[in-house]
Amino acid sequence: MFCRSYNYNYIIYHMQSYALCLLLVTLSEQQLSVAAFASQTKCVSLCQYQALHLAPQQLGEFKPIHLVGDDSSKEKQIDRSTRRVWLYDFVSDTQHDDTIPYHEAWDLQKRLMEQQLSRIGKRPKDPPLYNQFLPVNKNEEGVDSDSLIGCDSIIILQHDPVYTLGTASDTSFIHDYDNNSGNESRVPIVRIERGGEVTYHGPGQITVYPILDLRGYNQDIHWYMRALEEAILLALEKAGVAGATREEDVTGVWVSNKKIAACGVKLKRWVTMHGVAVNVDMRSLGNFDGIVPCGLEGREVTCVNDVIDDKKYTLQEFAVHMKAALEEIFCITLVSVA
């Protein structure tokens, strides 16, 4: 019988390295930035969607909510009218083409998320203080109106010009980055807590920030990213954009090999923030020249009005399609904040 000697320090070192790699993979997925491929769905009160045929995706796949669960062969009937979500609409609910400073919208997102987390509680075993969806009658269930801010919410707006960097974004993708901060006429740069590389927000682009508790949808980051993708592509389809798709191994929504929409999120205890951005009119394109969008060298961007000939959309008009798509994909009813 032979006795083999082992270098235990060597073994422990490699076990720790392997564990660290697994952790980094998990964290990168929690702050994933991807975009979408759409499919045909139908809008019905009880959220019964057609089967989808998706292009190759980076991670996971989208299933309609009524098919989500351990037994996907059994369809669940979900009444969308009972799944009411706050809508903070800074696009449709204005007579002017107003833009929102980035930090104001960011602060609103963080405030809504903290209210959600307070509603949920810190211990998984504790029941939430109240339902994540708005009651049909706001006075029912003994819920104080002020506390309803902790229910699911979606923000829709257009920003003042800004470049945003994810937590691990490479500043080399911003052209002339070192000289940017000293010139007030340049586009401001903000580093935030989402995943993904640098992107641009500004006038002519619709940005959507869902603040959702995924316990009411599907507690799966892959599913959530795919659902956001579906909403983008469904909105484009409703607007008459032909040929919108995703590209294998590349993030983003594409039309004729040009990027039209992007997505990047953060999750905390299954509550989401940040979201998606869709380029609508030509104003949205100019400042992309100052960056390498999403770190993809040599790729161009486009907008809705650049790829359709028979109509030119205002943001207010495209917002109608975006809201309808969100309602269909997430099986919700949007309720405007007064």
Image (cartoon, rainbow, N blue to C red):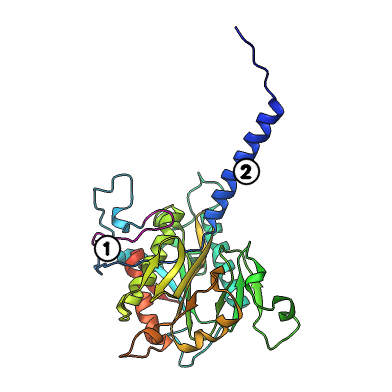
Quadrant holding the N terminus: top right
| Disc 1 packing (10 Å; few <14; some 14–19; many ≥20) | many
Residue 128 as seen in the image, left or right of residue 217? right
**Residue 325 picture quarter:** bottom left
Percent coordinates x, y for residue 72 in the rendering = 28, 48
Q: What stretch is highlighted in magenta?
A: 50-61
Dot placed on the residue nearer the N-terminal end, 2 or 1: 2
Percent coordinates x, y for residue 51 in the rendering = 24, 59
- Residue at horizontal 52 percent and vertical 58 percent from the top: 119
Q: Which of 30 and 19 is in front in this view?
A: 19
Let me know if residue 68 is in the magenta part: no
Percent coordinates x, y for residue 331 in the rendering = 33, 64
Residue 172 as seen in the image, left or right of residue 119? right
Q: How far apart are marks 2 and 1 (CA)?
A: 41 Å
Residue 13 drawn above or below residue 226: above
- Residue at horizontal 36 percent and vertical 64 percent from the top: 330
Between tags 2 and 1, which lies in front?
2
- Residue at horizontal 57 percent and vertical 64 percent from the top: 194
Q: What secondary structure is marked by label 1? A: loop
Residue, disc 1: 47
Quadrant holding the C terminus: bottom left
Label pair 2/1, CB-CB below 8 angstroms: no
Percent coordinates x, y for residue 132 in the rendering = 44, 60
Asked whether residue 80 appears in the rendered view, the answer is yes
Residue 304 as seen in the image, left or right of residue 173? left
Name which residue type carries label 2.
Leu
**Residue 47 picture quarter:** bottom left
Per the rendering, the mark at residue 20 is: 2
